[in-house]
Amino acid sequence: MDTVRIAVVGAGVMGLSTAVCISKMVPGCSITVISDKFTPETTSDVAAGMLIPPTYPDTPIQKQKQWFKETFDHLFAIVNSTEAEDAGVILIFRSIPTEEVPYWADVVLGFRKMTKDELKKFPQHVFGHAFTTLKCEGPAYLPWLQKRLVHALASDRKAGVEEEEAHT
């Protein structure tokens, strides 16, 4: 049987995460990541991702919660592993100035109403919630994803510029 060949467009967090997921779902496949830029030259390299989901009005809340929980659980497993530092995934305390309890409140850690003393630090707000979530540092997370992709026997290729093959 011929090897399944898959192309993923983009070498930022979304592209590399997609490639790593595909490598697990389709063992033995050949993956080519196509991008004009690779780490450390992508937008993701200068960004950090704070895990606080938006709400998409055309998508059922249960589906959004499922996606968020899967992402949270995945990153939480990393933060509790020996790879956390290399991956640049950390726990971070956050607060939001909202009275409404968001759909993801039971997914993050320690979701609660802010105390009166905490609210005093934000005089423009009369209510708020505090919780612990996860943060990915792009400059660490992208190289970590690339290493995982290499270990999955995939290859990276710059579209029309130069070719970088990653084999183990």
Image (cartoon, rainbow, N blue to C red):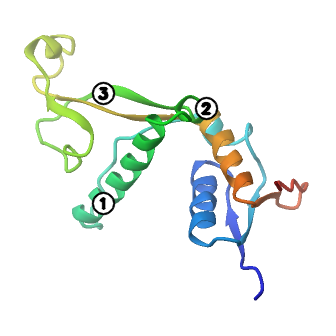
Residue at the spot 14% in from the left edge and 31% down from the top edge: 112
Nearest to the eye among marks 2 and 1: give it: 2
| Disc marking residue 66 | 1
Q: Residue visible at 13% across and 42% down?
A: 101
Contact check, label 2 and label 1, Cβ < 8 Å = no
Q: Residue at x 48, y 40 (%)?
A: 78
Image coords of residue 151 (percent x, y): 71, 53
Q: In the rendered structure, which disc, 1 or 3, sits on the residue that comes first in sequence?
A: 1
> Which residue does the image show at 40% across and 51% down from the upper left?
71
Report the number of numbered marks: 3
**Residue 149 is drawn in which quadrant?**
bottom right
Left or right, residue 72 beside residue 98: right
For disc 2, the marked residue is 86
Residue 61 x %, y %? 23, 61
Residue, disc 3: 94
Q: Residue furthest right?
A: 162
